[in-house]
Amino acid sequence: MEQKRYGHFDDQHREYVITDPQTPWPWINYLGNEDFFSLISNTAGGYSFYKDAKFRRITRYRYNNVPMDNGGRYFYIKDGDTVWNPGWKPCKTPLDFYECRHGMSYTRITGRKNGIEASVLFFVPLKKWAEVQKLTLTNQSKEVKQLKLFSFEEWCLWNAATDMENFQRNFSTGEVEIEGSTIYHKTEYRERRNHYAFYHVNAPIQGFDTDRETFVGLYNAFADPQAVMEGKPRNSHAHGWSPIASHYIEVTLQPGESKDFVFLLGYIENEQDEKFEAPQVINKKKAHALIAELDTTEKVDKAFAALCEYWDALLNIYKVKTGNDKLDRMVNIWNQYQCMVTFNFSRSASFFESGVGRGMGFRDSNQDLVGFVHQIPPRARQRIIDIASTQFPDGGCYHQYQPLTKRGNNDIGGGFNDDPCWLIFGTVAYIKETGDFSILDEMVPFDNQPGTEVTLFEHLKISMDHVIKNLGPHMLPLIGRADWNDCLNLNCFSWDPNESFQTTENVSEGTKAESLMIAGLFVVTGKDYVALCKKIGKADEAARMQQAVDAMIEAVKKDGWDGEWYLRAYDFYGRKIGSNECDEAKIFIESQGWCTMAEIGAEDGMVAKSLDSCKKYLECEHGMVLNNPAFSKYIYEYGEISSYPEGYKENAGIFCHNNPWVIIGETLAGRGNDAWNHYAKILPSYVEEKYQTLHKVEPYVNCQMVAGKDAFRPGEGKNSWLTGTAAWMWYTVSEFILGIKPDYDGIRIDPCLPETATDYTVNRKFREAEYEITIHPNGSQKGVKSITLDGKPIDGTVIPYSAGKHTVEVTM
Ligand code: BGC
């Protein structure tokens, strides 16, 4: 099937350029890096929030709406009888030219119609709680143009969940203030909120609207708001109902003339005793100050330059030059960018995650760290402390916490028995990157309760112990509510569609449900833990845990092997899951990934057999599926996994997240060709080239799931952006394929490449050092023959750390 193209990469500017607004699905970007965030689609849809997409939503957005992607920051331009938007939507007036450039934390959307160009640059300046929208209007025609410009934002009443359901209250609480060219949103400020938002423009306005129905008209839509269609603002003042913010500006442009308007969507917090400047009037001092920092083109351009420099610096930490553009652009730009985004949002807010259902995941956020720790280590450090603070004294933990409060989320609770191990995974990655062992001595509470603090190291110890204390009849880890696969619910037993698979555990007393995925994870992280203990002089603890790791390896070899691959689990009754004896789902990817990463039974050929089975049963054109064959019916004993139609999500979808586990297994086994083939299949730049229409979702980032070979439309992607795939793809390519591995005492060099690989160079900043590492593969898939550091040969494969600039040559 011929595939239509909707855009292309612009590597020089680190942008993806969308040239047709009617993409197969909204293709979005993220703005903001620390506190104030926005999601923005290629037609300017999306929303903003402060820290927490559930509790502090600033603008309103409608998920699951018709048309899709409804609501955003819209500019309406009325030029005679023609009304259009630079991003095509919502009016959908055909444009003479359209382009959306998604870049690193910014998006630029340009539209042209009847001789007018409107170009909007959207970004959140560093350290500012505001989204800038710099609109440049240019008259490219030969006539004088009189334009009517309307801006538009719709306020969310802060809590995104109640905003969508509690209309009996919401329709009476909305309040705004208008001052000059600024519209303030202050719903609930009169009572318990100490924050408000504003929407400002740095030009005099000739009118405004703040009441949605007055502006749009009860029987109209965003595509034809009455005020815009008639070219007449109503100067409405919202009292309840749905407050909005719309500026009206009359613009005259001479031929060739260009004018900038800086729109600013800001968020302010005030101290309790400084909330009001007069009864019922909000104190606007901080808003005025923020506006003053960004009220001219020059100031905005400077803030934008600073943002670009920030990304220059971040993307200079790891840079590869292989000569393969498709690989280089993912490694140097998009994969690292996506890692920052997943670090910031975990799985909370995307066009598939509504921002109200999930906060920061315990396992998710730990995994996200391996993709991010090299970028801004101090933020990674704080994240580890925050995550560990949601642990319980027995080593178990909350599955999720809310970013605003940093408190564990009671709706989800705990009991996911893989969770604790991930804390080791994240912490070890942090220490290897930074050499900062002091984090282990940080005092960290349990469940955020002051007075319960123990060292972070103690948290790691109880994490390992949590696995050891929860073993089943085969001495394999009990699965609990679920392991990494949230949908393998072996103690759930639900016939009630109103029960959540994730949080319901109807029977667990007497369970024999064990997980081979946790077994592998325990061995991998256990080895890391042992090495860490040795490194910090805790020999006894190292020996104790080594024994537990050895015992787990034996248990897997004895009761976790099916002959050609590792079993997946034992169910409640102790029956095999993921075995040749099963009717369906005979093999699962998770245990192949983790047990090959743990190299369990490598000496007996188990690893090689497992990897071969992945190729034989799981691999297809678009990647490796999660299980094979797919479940064709709901299985009460297994839970959610069997609830999905064949080929989707956890039922035999290509869950991109766990493809890298097998790929790492391949690299450890030295099978560079196989590793590369698996990797390229889910590498966005390769998918972009071949499958833009079929794949549907953004071609510049990984998505969580691509429909598998049993699906109706294999290759169709879903759940883009917020997925552990980002961090795992990064970890895989940077450390295991290209082979640059941070270690306690330096950088370990251990590439695993396809035999067609040619010489390549990695520039790696590491602590206070900067290495230029050139690898000469010489047709070899694995095995470093010799290394020189600054011209002198070194022993072994670890470049010993020392500050300063170094050149490294590696011969394979
Ligand atoms: C969740 C992960 C989980 C995965 C597999 C994702 O949606 O964020 O925590 O491991 O699904 O079920």
Image: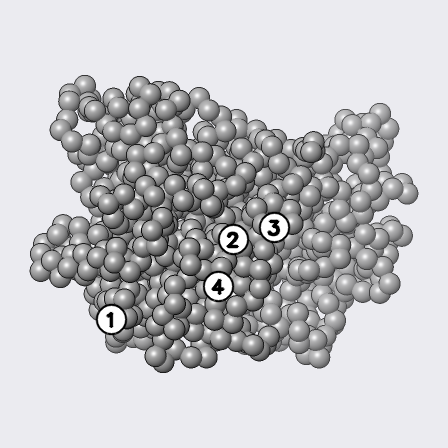
Q: CA distance from mark 3 to mark 4?
A: 18 Å
Q: Quadrant of the C terminus?
A: top left
**Relative depth, front residue between 535 and 499:** 499
Residue position for label 2: 629
Mark 1 and mark 4: Cα distance apart in space: 23 Å
How crowded pointer 4 is (Cα within 10 Å; few <14, some 14-19, many 20+) is rated as many
Nearer-N-terminus badge (3/1):
1
Cα distance between the residues tagged 3 and 1: 40 Å
Secondary structure type for disc 3: loop
Which of the two discs, 2 and 1, labels the residue nearer the N terminus?
1
Which is more foreground, mark 3 or mark 4?
3
Q: CA distance from mark 2 to mark 4?
A: 17 Å
- Residue beneath the point at 74% across and 62% down: 210
Q: Residue furthest front?
A: 581
At label 1, which amino acid type do we have?
Lys
Q: Are marks 3 and 2 in contact (CB under 8 Å)?
A: no
Amino acid type at image mark 3: Ala
Q: Of the residues under marks 1 and 4, which one precedes in the sequence?
A: 1
Relative to 121, does residue 389 appear above or below in the rendering? below
Residue under numbered circle 4: 487
Q: Amino acid at mark 4?
A: Cys
Instruction: Tell me which residue sits at (18%, 40%) in the image.
Output: 745
Q: Secondary structure at mark 4?
A: loop
